[in-house]
Every structure is written in C-alpha cells, then in structure tokens.
Amino acid sequence: MAFKKESIVPYLYLLPWVIGFILFTGGPIIAAIFISFTKWDLLSPPVWVGLANFTNMFRAGSEFWGILKVTLIFMVFSVIITMCWSLFTALLLNQKVRGTGVFSFFYFAPAVVPLISLTFVFQLMFSKELGIVNYLLSLTGIEGPNWLMDSRLVLWVVTVLCIYTYFTGQMMLIFDSALKEVPKELYEAAEIDGANAVDKFFKITIPAISPIFFFNLVTGTINSLNTSFALIYPLTGGGPGKATQVMSLDIYVNAFKNFRMGYASAEAVILFAITAALSLLQFRLAKKWVYYEA
Amino acid sequence: MKKRLLVGLLVLGLVCVLAPAAYSADTTVKYAHWNALSEEYNYVKAFEEKYPDIKIEFTLIPEAEYSQKLTTMVMAGTAPDVMCLWECDISRFANGGFVDPLDDYVSESETLTLDDFIPAVQDLIEMQGKLYGLPWCFATEVMYYNKDAFDKAGIPYPDENWTWEDFENAAKKLTVVENGKVEQWGCDALGFQGLWYSLIGTFGDDIVNDKGQFSIGEGAKEFLNWWYRLTNEEKVVAPPQISTSGIISTDLFVAGKAAMAFNGSWMVSVYRDIENFKWDIAPIPKGVRQYSTLHTGFFTINSASKVKDAAWKFIEFCMSEEGQELINKAANNPSARISILEKGYYRVQGPMGPENWDAIDKTAQFAQWGYVLLPSGLTFDIVKDFNAAILGQMGIDEVVGKAIDRAKEILGEEGVASE
C-alpha cells in the first residue's frame, strides 16, 4: 500500500488565524459559558451560583420573556424587510437602463454612513414636534404620531430603519452579483416558451440565486440577533419602557451598566443557543428549496 | 577585526542613546479623563510647568466606554495613577480596595480644607466612611426659562422662592395654542434622565438615603401623577421626546417652542449660542423641599500606584485656585470649593443670557449626589419606564413598583430601602 505523508505546510499557514480565533473568539466564548454560572460585578472575585442566573431569567414574571418576544419579532420582520428590500434594489440595478452605476452609488450610500450619525438624523426626522416626517404628514392634514415614543409603533419604525444599515447594503451587493451570474440563456429559452416576467422571476431567478438567497438569509438572521444593538441603542436606547429592548442590548446593559456579568453571560449563552438552533433549522429546511447546480 | 569594530561601535551608539534616559529622574504620573485637554486652559501643562520633574501621561478614554475601560484596566493592573472616577464607580472601587483614602493628604495640605467644599462632599464622606475622591468641578440641574416669553405673557421671572404651584400657573399662561396646534409649550418634556430624580426629590423621596440605599415611593407616585396631568390633561408640558442617553436631538427650548425647560447646568454652554430670545436660569422650584442632583468626577489615587506622592501633588494642584481656574474655564463648570465657586471663573456669558449665575451657587447649597451613585443601567432603565408612564403606556403605581423590584434585583435586597 503506497503511503504518502501529508504535508503540514498548509496547516502552518492556517495556524495564525487559528491561534487568533482561540485567543480572541473561542476562548472568550468558553469563558462566557463559565461566567454564566457565577455572580460577578467585575471588581470583586466571581461567586459560583450554579444555575441561579438561568432560573432567574426563566421564572414567571421575569422581564426576560418580554425581551425574548421583542427580539424574535424584531428578528423575523427585519430579516423579511431587509431581504425583500435588498433583493428589490438589486433587481432594479440589473435592469437594462442607463446610469445604474449612479443608482448603485446612492443605494449603497446609507450603508457607509456611520450608524450613530444616521440614528441621530432619524431622531430628528421622526420627532413629533420638530420632525420632517410629521411636517409632511401635516401638509396632507394628518397629525403625525410620536413615532419613536409610541410603544405600538416604535418597534416597526426601528425594523423598517434596518434597511439603512451596512448589512443591508452588503446584502444588496451580494444579490447584485448573484443576479449577474444567472445564465441569460435560461431567460431566452423561457421567453421562447412563452413565460411572462412573474414566471421568469419565480421559476428562474429565485432558484438560480437560491444559494445566495440562503446565505443572506442565514447571515441576516444572525446579524439581526447580534448586531441590531448598533442600531437600537443610539436610536431608542431600548425604550420606551422595554418596547425595543432586544437581547443583544439587554446583555450590554446588564454587563457594563449594571455590572451583572454573570447574568449577562447567561443571556449571551441563551442568545447563542437560539442563534444556533435557528441556523440549524434553516440548514435543514434549505434542502427543500436551495438549488445547487449539479 | 573589522567585524569587532562594527559591533563595538553599535554598542557604543546604543549606550549613548540609552544613557540620558537612565539619568532622567523624571517621575511619570499616568492620568485618565473623558474630556480632551483644552488648548487654552490646559491644566496638565500648567502643572508640568510648575513641577518640572513630574511628567503627566494623559490618556483620553471616550465617555461612552469610560466606566467599563477603567474597570477592566484596574482589574488588569494597568490603571492610571490618578483616575477621575464617575460617581457610580467610586463606591465600587472604594469597596474593592482599588483607591486610597485621601483624608490624611487633605489634612496635611496647606491649600485645601474640608470646610471649603460644598456640603454634598461631607455627605459622601459620611456615607463611605472616608474621603476617597475630590470633585474636579461639578455640574447640577436647573430650570431654564425664556425671558421674552415671560415678558409677553406678563409673568414675573422665576426666582429661588418659586413653588410648583407658581410653576403650574406660569406654564398654563405660557402655553400658546393656534388653530388647535400648540405653538409654544409652557414647559418642555424632561429629557436628561437626572431631572426625573431631581424633581421626584423635591416631592420628598430620598432617592439615595444616607446608607446608600435606593429609596423612592410616595413622592415618585405623587410627582408622576402630577406630571401626567400637566402633560396629558392640562397639556402645558410637551410629551416625551426620544433621547439617546440623555442627549436630546430635538430641544424645544432652543427652538423657542417651550418657555421653560429643566436640564443640566452644562447646557449653559450650549444655550449660549441662542440668538433669538433672551433667557436665564433659576433653581428648580420647591416642592416639600428643594432638591437637585450633583454631577462630578472624583480625582482618586490608584491603590496600586507606585508614585502616590507625585499623584497627590497633581491632584492638589488641580484642586488649588490655579488649577481650578483653568478647569472651570475649560469645562464651564463651577468649582466644588466654595471659595473658588464664588469667584465665578466658570461664568462665560452668552449674548442672550444667562445673568442669574447665582442660581447655580444657590443650587449647590442643597444639591445632593442622589441617583448618580447608582449603576447607570438601572437609573436609565427606570427613566424609560417613567416616560412610558407619562405616555400612558404603563400605570404609575406599576412603574414605581417595578422600579423598586428591578433595583432589588440589581443591587440586592440590602441595596434598597425597606418601605
């Protein structure tokens, strides 16, 4: 039996990244799991409390249930809205019109503006007394509501504003390049067979870009659970009350503003479990609708 | 031979470069703060000029991460020698043994005496047992009012004898409604979170009692019910606006759409740029008592510091008249030392106001630390619920009950006063 010794050189090339991952990502994740079983205010030594943080989180009447509900509603609708928007704008950019370069620039421009400045501008725009949105509404005779302070409206406003984040811009670019990869012959063949635009979209475009669609779906879900913090914290701070308090924001507040590292780590572990479970579910379901070219 | 000569020259060069460093007997004191040093009023540079053998290594830590960064640095043992600590951190650091008491330094000092400080400093010493920090300057919370609007409505200006009844009557007269839309509100909504606690304090609640426990109850309920009536039934107070950690992007007072507003005294440096109307300041009106909140940062000495005497020299300089003059002018904040406060270095006038600087001096006499001693996550969270109550989204008894429960969870049962 011929035996060839595998070269270790490729592994050596991987080593720097692996070391960095273990030190800065993997290690802290393991540490967070341990910390979730303690009570720790960062200055005094940690005190082991076992499952107390978790039982506290899941007891009846705990605020955690409300936070979980807000997180899940936000996740579902922000993923739907941002994916539809980014696919829509990518489709527009793939039409045979002049000046798509200019449009491309403007569609992507909000994504590169720092989120903090965007949220400040949104606060001004949506102000009940001084905002331009209510001003325009008043011209048509409608009295605009208090957009960011009405607990029934604020979550929807925040969800829609997700289309201005960097991640949505990135999804648009990825869809854009995916759409360009769809073989034109498929469209021509379909036209010959008498397909209209709707048929072409659902029977050719969607299946052809389904791997990219799936990629954006999974990363979009993970992003809405983890990094929604960057949009929500400056925009509403989680208020009014706890109407927009998503888990990622609650973890930050508990860890660094209330000095409850143990509880915050426990929340982070739960968030990780939810994200992993959702991703697993999406991968399982993907077998049914994602079409990889043979 | 040639190689040896080359090595010899290299070593000689190295010695020449390193020798001066070994001879410089400079002590370096590391110092951290959240404000950049002003060009014009650079108190660090002034200190270095006075004490040439001590160098200050200044680190600017951004405000948003100031508390967290100092905490992690202290744990890692890399914290600066002089830390300007926030009020919510000083207790934790003192209890953890990370900062040294300053009592002996102050009693031996020739320039500083404890009697010269505003009353709240003594309260803090009693609460913590020792003096752990000296306030670099302070800010407090006051009432702002639009003089032109008061003239138009024919109401005399507010003074330190104003009660909440005077306030309500004025607010009703100052609210201007045209075509069903409010063109001018009597008073703006409470933006900065501290004001909620200051106003509740005037209704009698301790906020933080002398044992350091969180304490709100009947005063808060009474205040919230009254404020709810003014906002929703009388409609003389504007409804709550969104704000990011207390920074309001839509300030109705500045826009001339609210005749009165409550805010931190630091807003004087922002409102200074107002050009359209004359304005002034007054202490917060009296309820069952006068109350306002103090904001500051405390100069502290790191227990792990190896240059404590030099660190104290720096703190002493900053608290001296020379240092305080520079700090007050740079930050537009008054000094916590009464003798210097009276000199008014912090008073930088704008074209339209304020004139009644005494309001700040008078407020300093009764203002207390209050909510700033508690974790900011808890106090900000409770304010979000207060806003929800004023918007009618939560019941007022419910909000106060929830606030106490949440405080018990975060501070422990012993951190909350028993009712």
Image: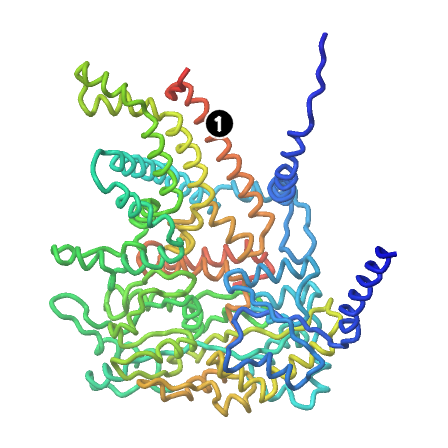
> Is A261 rendered above or below residue A124?
above
Residue A51 visible at all? no
- Residue B117: x and y in percent read 58, 85
Which residue is disc 1 drawn over? Answer: A280
Left or right for B361, reference B253: right
Q: Looking at the image, which is closer to me, A239 or B332?
A: B332
Quadrant of residue B263 within the rendered picture: bottom left
Q: Looking at the image, which is closer to me, B107 or B62?
A: B62
Residue A280 visible at all? yes
Left or right for B380, reference A194: right
Quadrant of residue B276 within the rendered picture: bottom left
Q: Residue at x 48, y 80 (%)?
A: B333
- Residue B91: x and y in percent read 62, 67
Q: Looking at the image, which is closer to me, B5 or B154?
A: B5
Q: Residue at x 54, y 88 (%)?
A: B338
- Residue B231: x and y in percent read 28, 66
Q: Looking at the image, which is closer to me, A29 or B389?
A: A29
